[in-house]
Image: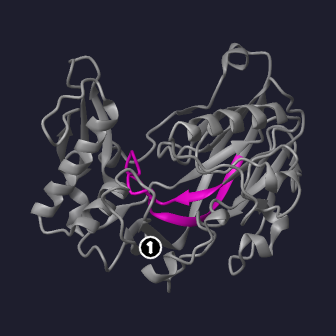
Amino acid sequence: MKSVHIDRNKRLKDQPTTGHNRFHPAIPPIVAVEEGEEIELETRDGVDGQLGPAATEADMALMDAGAIHPLTGPVFVKGAQPGDVLEVEFVDIVPQPHAFTAIVPGLGFLRDLFTTPYLVHWQIRDGWATSPRLPGVRIPGSSFMGVSGVAPSEAQVRAWTAREHDLMSRGGMVFPPDASGAVPSAGVGATEGLRTLPPRENGGNFDVKQLTKGSKLLLPVAVEGALFSTGDGHFAQGDGEVCVTAIEMGATAAVRLRVLKGTAATRALRGPRFSHAGYFAPPEWAAPKGFVAAMGMPIREDGTNDGENLTLACRNAVLNMIELLQERGWSREQAYVLCSVAADLRISNVVDVPNYVVSALIPEAIFAG
């Protein structure tokens, strides 16, 4: 089996032949595999090691935001052509022993309310994550890769850049192309490459926690060889990842890459799809036997009914769960972190107008540590 090894004591910029942190078809592959071949990819954490075990909240202000999401790859898959589908089977995902969760000012679902940095360091051992900052909490491992994608075509880069600039002109939050912190550091991959924060049709940073060992991810191929990359390993995450980070870790991902040709799925696939033949996590955690939940509805603080606003229902579900956790003695910041790493946002209904319901569920067993 082929492998891509990295030096975990070095940043990606100091070892640029192992990966990249932008999406662009001009970024050359670092390794080639046969169709159906398995490859092992060592990956860095999502902030490229900038929040290591000794880091504090003060270090967060010094982070290079342009270096976010160092990816290992691209991997050239022989036989993959535009119009095909790349099937990525996650054969194994092995975590590193240190991880972190951070509240980052300016980012996250409740970024208007949480404006102070907060950092939690986790120790990963025997399938659990624990932290001195969350005493008595044990988070079970359910490792997955936050970012997995293939290269976009040049036409897609132009189209997606234009649509994101349009969104930015209308007040949307967008990270446009920027060579600062980019790997590669020069060329069109740096100046025109798509930032990795948002997922797109080619995959990317979708943070889908069900993509654990045994899952299969389908990605539409836009360039010869597909040019697959992955990174941003997560040891565990709640559906929503509301504070903008999960339990963030370096990892080693073993993937098997197959090319699907001439199928109905090939013709219809417009964006990522995924499947899992078994449980993505042990059933007692995937659908916890014991949990507590808080509902959210599209009602503003002043009582105004903002009918059918699913985002507002999500927001209120998270706020209500934070309040519930504070009633149990957790600080506001601890509660927000717990929501991000362990609470699942579930769409309970989108038909009972005007008040759609989103529920936030958290397993009671995480507090039995």
Residue 150: x, y in percent?
74, 41
Q: Looking at this rendering, what residue extends furthest in the left direction? A: 327
Residue situated in front as seen by the camera: 275 or 204: 204
Task: Tell me the amino acid under the disc marked 1.
Answer: Arg
Residue depicted at 38% across the width and 50% down the height: 109
Res 348 → quadrant: top left
What's the residue at 42%, 74% (across, down)? 122
Give the residues in magenta: 231-255
Note whether 208 is above or below 322 in the view shown: above
Q: Nearer the viewer, residue 236 or 89?
A: 236
Label 1 CA crowd tier, 10 Å (few <14, some 14–19, many 20+): few
Residue 1 visible to the viewer:
no
Residue 109 appears in view: yes
Location of the C terminus (image quadrant)? bottom left
Q: Secondary structure at mark 1?
A: strand
| Position of residue 105 in the picture relative to residue 8 (left or right) | left
Give residue 1's quadrant in the image.
bottom right
Instruction: Give the percent coordinates (x, y) of residue 110.
Output: 34, 53
Q: Report the side of 4 relative to 107 (left or right).
A: right
Q: Quadrant of residue 350?
A: top left
Q: Which residue is mark 1?
A: 125
70 inside magenta stretch: no
Q: Is 252 included in the stretch rendered in magenta?
A: yes
Vertical relation: 199 (above or below) 191: above
Along the line of sight, the residue nearer the viewer: 177 or 78? 177
Who's the residue at 55% across and 43% down the image?
206
Give how far across and how far down residue 126 sits, in percent: 43, 70
Where does residue 162 sit, x and y in percent of width and height? 70, 35
